[in-house]
Amino acid sequence: MRRVLHYRLLGLSEQRLEQFEALAAARTWRCDPPWVASPRSRGLFEMEYFRHLREDDRSDLSAGGFVKMAGDETDALIITIFMRDLSAEYGMRTAIKDEDHPLAKLRRLEFESGRLPSGQALEDVLAKRPVIKKVQGERIFFYPPTFRLHSQGPPSPEWAYALCGIRAYAPTLMEAEQEALKILRGLGHLGA
């Protein structure tokens, strides 16, 4: 059975829900693209899913959804960071439930205005090791901002990525992934 990541948005205005369509279109997903069910949903499945969510959670639930993972940790990480960013940008609450996450401390996450309930930033609890993505037989390494290449080196404020002996930085994981894939495609055209 494939791993399933559930997410909920609480206190988000209906006008902001189009952010999900923008996220789904912003990259190529190895898993199914993320979707959201809300009071505005018109599909039968989405309306029923949202009705069941409302029955389970009587709080200020605005929307919710789930996505079946296809073995790509970067998909799960990007959805988690996106939920954190939505929470920070709009001063709302988001929740993610990922029962099969390999790290127990990341199986249930809630964000309030971009912070965990403890007040910590997501980066404080992320694994401080690289995330590896295999594409076309090549490995791309993504290093979180808290990762230190050398024990004496300072952490970078940006995500680092490395492939084919090239190392660079980008402000977000999604931008790092897009740039790394561009480099990989370019090297493919050169026959490298």
Image (cartoon, rainbow, N blue to C red):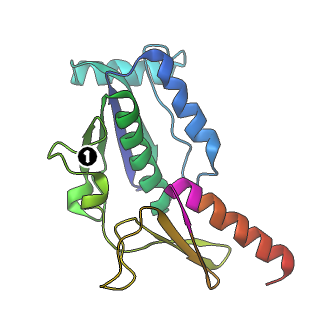
Looking at the image, residue 23 sits to the left or right of residue 115; the answer is right
Q: Quadrant of the C terminus?
A: bottom right
* Residue 97: percent from left, percent from top: 29, 45
Which residue is denoted by mark 1 in the rendering?
A: 109
The amino acid type of the residue labelled 1 equals Leu
The residue most toward the right is: 190
Please tell me which residue lies in front, 146 or 40: 146
Q: Is residue 175 magenta?
A: yes
Looking at the image, residue 93 sits to the left or right of residue 64; the answer is left
Q: Is residue 28 magenta?
A: no
Query: Looking at the image, is 182 positioned above or below residue 4?
Result: below
The picture quadrant where one finds residue 164 is bottom right
Q: Which residues are magenta?
A: 169-176
* Residue 69: percent from left, percent from top: 46, 53
The residue carrying pointer 1 sits among few (fewer than 14), some (14 to 19) or many (20 or more) residues within 10 Å by Cα, namely some
Query: Looking at the image, is 185 positioned above or below residue 106?
Result: below
Task: Count the labels in the image.
Answer: 1
Q: Residue at x 71, y 70 (%)?
A: 183
Please tell me which residue lies in front, 78 or 114: 114
The residue most toward the left is: 118
Query: Looking at the image, is 38 positioned above or below residue 129?
Result: above
Q: Residue at x 53, y 30 (%)?
A: 19
Please tell me which residue lies in front, 188 or 89: 89
* Residue 11: percent from left, percent from top: 31, 21
Q: Residue at x 41, y 20 (%)?
A: 48
Q: Quadrant of the N terminus?
A: bottom left
Query: Looking at the image, is 128 positioned above or below residue 165?
Result: above
Looking at the image, residue 87 sits to the left or right of residue 189; the answer is left
* Residue 49: percent from left, percent from top: 39, 25
Q: Helix, strand, or loop for circle 1?
A: strand
Q: Residue at x 29, y 53 (%)?
A: 122
